[in-house]
Image (tube, grey):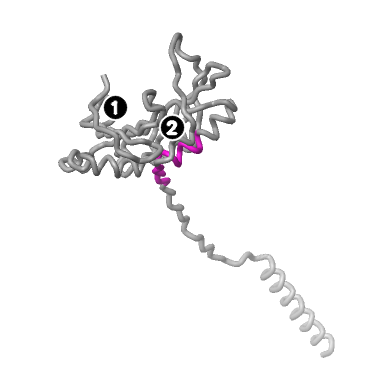
Amino acid sequence: MRIVRQAALVIVFVTLAILLISCSSSTPNTVSAEKPSVTPATEVKLPSLYTGKACFSRMVDSAQRWQADAMPVQLESEVNDESTGQDGKATVWRARFASPSRQQLRTFTCSGSRLAGAAPFGVTGSVESPFPPHAIVQVFQPTYLLVDSDKAFTTAQAHGGAALMKDDPKQPVYYFATLDTKSGGVHWFVSYGKSMDVTDGIGVIDASTGKYLQATGPRH
């Protein structure tokens, strides 16, 4: 009987060992719960609108890093699909500078535009170009430009500009600042059109005092 019991115990142990080996070697069925992929929303980069002085000061800094004696010749805005120029703001401004010591000109652009093909965001400079032969390049001190383009716009509006804009709420407005050789001061030209040539009227404002000076027509 003792032999029978021992044989039975051996069978039980062997059976348990087989079951344990079988369980450890088998791979349990698992379900992988994959998280659905989430596509991040595309970031929309909006354009930045600047007044003339806001861009002008940045371009002056860049120009004087180019040449220490660089002085502004003119400042102008750009009318595009992002801004009509109303309220004295634009996404792109350009300023031309002259270096008298080197007799070279260079244009700097201050851009907040996001349009395809527009000037890169920030301040960039063009290649240098020599002074035109026999031409007198008129420069002015940056400190002469005290009145910003938004103030020039308000003044122009009060002197006939509002009437020009009444029939067209999307009337483009272009800004141009340069030295007036007769008075020796810097003038803002607020053109109710896309340029100084394509315009319905131009208001001239003293860029140092903000005083309204006169109205004029397109340049020819």
- What amino acid is found at the position of numbered circle 2 in the picture? Ala
Residue range highlighted in magenta:
45-59
Residue 25 appears in the figure: yes
Which residue type carries mark 1? Answer: Met
Q: Label 1, on which residue?
A: 196
Query: What quarter of the picture does the N terminus occupy?
Result: bottom right
Q: Residue 54 in magenta? A: yes
Whole-number angstrom distance, CA of label 2 to CA of label 1: 21 Å
Q: Residue at x 74, y 74 (%)?
A: 17
* Residue 193 image position (x, y, % from top left): 25, 32
User: Are the residues flagged by discs 2 and 1 in contact, CB closer than 8 Å?
Assistant: no
Q: Position of residue 112 (x, y in %)?
A: 43, 40
Query: Is residue 210 or residue 173 the one in the foreground?
Result: 210
| Residue 78 in sight from this viewpoint | no
Neighbour class for label 1 at 10 Å: few (<14), some, many (≥20)?
Answer: many
Residue at position x 49%, y 38% in the image: 57
Within the magenta stretch, is there residue 26? no
Left or right of 11 on screen, residue 83? left
Q: Closer to the N terminus: mark 2 or mark 1?
A: 2
Task: Give x and y (percent) for residue 137.
Answer: 45, 18
Image position of 99 (left or right of 53): right
Residue indicated by mark 2: 119
Q: Say which element carries label 1.
A: loop
Residue 217 position, x and y percent, is 23, 27
Identify the residue at horizontal 39%, vertical 23% (top origin). Answer: 181
Is the residue 209 above or below the residue 19 in the image? above
Residue sitting at x 44%, y 9%: 134
Q: Residues within 10 Å of mark 2 (few under 14, many from 20)?
A: some
